[in-house]
């Protein structure tokens, strides 16, 4: 077993919950991330909460991350919501007791509003014992690491931090030297995938359909992962290769195909993936 997380999007969206768990276990992952869609899919399969927990325990798999919360700015009443799936996400937090809630922001908003909203979201998540990991995405309102850093620093919550997605960082164009301007303890998760030399015309479509396995593209992992892990950051590590090619594979094959180059990369860099407990 490797201390790696199988991100929900690495498998096709129609993969049944039990197949996800079994594929992750067979490939050697220790954890999975899930969204409300996967949880609701399990219920539609006929699994109740007790059966879901039984399935996870039987396969020695933990749910480590839930999300993605994307609509968390305060409304007129000043109370930040989480998402259209808010009640489900909080229920998932109680059920799985994961490490973190992942969040992003699709629409561009003012920086003060995002700082305030992120702070409220962190406070609400803290009541559930959760970290809140913000993802910067080139085609979103938090377009790069520098904007994400401003929000996390501005909110100044102990449970608020960042996700380092290698694909998003590469496409965002931020200088590698900037990585170490984030306090190392604020890097909560490292997500691994590779990128093509020539971007697709629509970066959103490439992000959702055309990522590559580590080693197949042009991302300089020695530089970015080396910098990230070399100054004291200790993120959990997730395999997030969102690819139509993987989605066409059987779940067990896709999970194994995705983890193998990630393990090889981490071994080559001398990185020991940590677990959060």
Image (cartoon, rainbow, N blue to C red):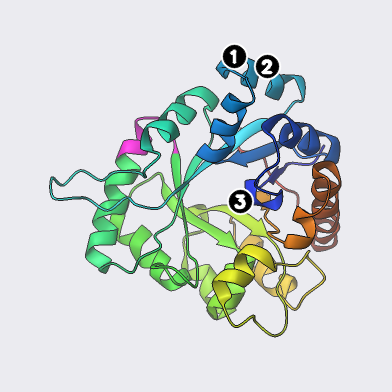
**What number is the disc on residue 26?**
none
Residue tagged by mark 2? Answer: 54
Residue tagged by mark 3? Answer: 234
Give whichever of 250, 223 is nearer the camera. Answer: 250
Give whichever of 186, 250 is nearer the camera. Answer: 250
Instruction: Tell me which label, 2 or 3, sits earlier in the chain.
Output: 2
Disc 2 from disc 3: Cα separation: 30 Å
Image side of residue 6 versus residue 170, left or right:
right
Which x, y percent locates residue 175? 55, 81
Q: Which residues are magenta?
A: 124-130
Image side of residue 31 versus residue 160, left or right:
right
Image quarter where the N terminus lies is top right
Residue at x 34% of width, y 62% of height = 151
Give whichever of 96, 223 is nearer the camera. Answer: 96
Disc 1 from disc 2: Cα separation: 6 Å
Which x, y percent locates residue 89? 44, 35
Give SS at disc 1. helix
Residue at x 49% of width, y 29% of height = 92
Measured along the vertical axis of the image, is residue 147 above or below residue 248?
A: below
Give SS at disc 2. helix
Residue at x 40% of width, y 63% of height = 106
Residue at x 20% of width, y 43% of height = 79
Q: Is residue 119 visible?
A: yes
Image quarter where the C terminus lies is top right
Give whichever of 240, 120 is nearer the camera. Answer: 240
Q: Is residue 202 magenta?
A: no
Q: Are discs 1 and 2 less than 8 Å apart at CB?
A: yes
Which x, y percent locates residue 69? 42, 48
Give SS at disc 3. loop
Mark 1 surroundings within 10 Å by alpha-carbon count, few (fewer than 14), some (14 through 19), many (20 or more)? few
Disc 3 from disc 1: Cα separation: 32 Å
Residue tagged by mark 1? Answer: 50
């Amino acid at each position: 077993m490797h201390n790696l997380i199988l991100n929900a999007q690495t498998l096709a969206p129609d993969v049944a919950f039990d197949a996800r768990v079994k594929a992750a276990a067979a490939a050697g992952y220790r954890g999975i991330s899930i969204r409300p869609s996967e949880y609701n899919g399990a219920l539609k399969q006929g699994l109740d909460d007790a059966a879901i927990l039984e399935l996870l325990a039987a396969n020695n798999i933990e749910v480590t991350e839930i999300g993605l919360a994307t609509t968390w700015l305060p409304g007129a009443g000043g109370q930040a919501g989480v998402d259209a799936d808010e009640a489900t996400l909080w229920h998932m937090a109680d059920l799985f007791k994961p490490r973190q809630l992942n969040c992003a922001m699709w629409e561009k908003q003012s920086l003060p509003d995002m700082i305030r909203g992120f702070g409220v979201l962190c406070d609400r998540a803290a009541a559930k014992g959760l970290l809140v990991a913000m993802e910067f995405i080139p085609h979103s309102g938090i377009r790069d690491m520098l904007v994400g850093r401003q929000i996390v620093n501005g909110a100044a919550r102990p449970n608020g931090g960042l996700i380092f997605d290698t694909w998003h960082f590469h496409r965002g164009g931020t200088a590698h030297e900037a990585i170490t301007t984030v306090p190392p303890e604020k890097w909560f998760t490292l997500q691994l995938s590779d990128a093509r030399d020539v971007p697709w015309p629509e970066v959103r479509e490439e992000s959702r359909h055309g990522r590559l396995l580590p080693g197949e593209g042009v991302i300089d992992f020695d530089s970015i992962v080396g910098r990230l892990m070399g100054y004291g950051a200790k993120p959990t590590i997730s395999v997030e290769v969102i690819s139509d090619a993987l989605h066409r594979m059987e779940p067990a094959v896709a999970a194994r195909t995705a983890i193998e180059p990630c393990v090889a990369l981490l071994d080559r860099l001398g990185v020991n993936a940590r677990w959060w407990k």
